[in-house]
Image (tube, rainbow, N blue to C red):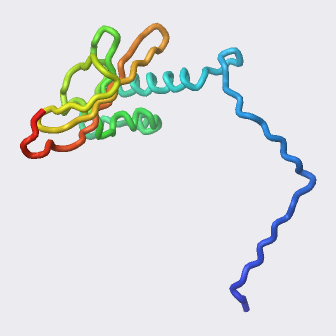
Amino acid sequence: MSTGRWQIEIVEQVDQLPVVWHPWVQSTTSQGMEPPNEMAKIMFVSALKLLANRGEGPFAWAEPFYQDPIAFLLDTSSDAINLWGSSGELLYCNRSAERLGTGRYEGKAWEVFTFEGRRYERRCCSIRYGNVGYLLEVIGDRGELPVGESG
């Protein structure tokens, strides 16, 4: 019959002490690896290229899309996401951005603006990948304007 009591024992494993602390080492290109920020850019651009081949409608997603978490996040975000090329051409927009349709913005890295009776927050990030410059834009809906306030 069990008493419902437990005994926990802590054992020091002397043969594995002391544990040597190793500082985190940042990867460099000289070791054949990309620095973390370059790796992030590669993954981001790869996800966008994958999304550029997406079809329309409810069956647009195929198995390869589900295997890319960045592509999944970009496409399913309720915030509008646009990627603009260096010549001002729209390279990618998710479905939220298609519905919003605000057009290209050439301004601050962050702003709050009104559009069609709603308040939005826009954040922009310049990205350089290789010799090409991009502008990543994320626009979040912050709700309806209070009664009597206009943009």
Residue 53 visible within the image: no
Instruction: Tally the numbered discs.
Output: 0
Indicate the quadrant where residue 75 lies.
top left
Residue situated furthest front in the rendering: 148
Q: Does residue 30 appear to the left or right of 109 in the view shown?
A: right
* Percent coordinates x, y for residue 62 in the rendering: 38, 36
In this rendering, is residue 133 above or below 121?
A: above
Give the camera-side residue of 68 and 143: 143
Q: Residue at point 18% right, 27% down?
A: 101
Q: Residue at point 32% right, 28% down?
A: 110
Q: Quadrant of the N terminus?
A: bottom right
Q: Residue at point 24% right, 36% down?
A: 57
Q: Does residue 27 appear to the left or right of 19 in the view shown?
A: left
Indicate the quadrant where residue 21 lies.
top right
Give the camera-side residue of 37 and 145: 145
Q: Does residue 126 appear to the left or right of 15 in the view shown?
A: left
Residue 89 visible within the image: yes
* Percent coordinates x, y for residue 71 in the rendering: 40, 33
Indicate the quadrant where residue 49 lies.
top left
Q: Residue at point 72% right, 88% down?
A: 2
Residue situated furthest left in the rendering: 148
Q: Does residue 1 appear to the left or right of 53 in the view shown?
A: right
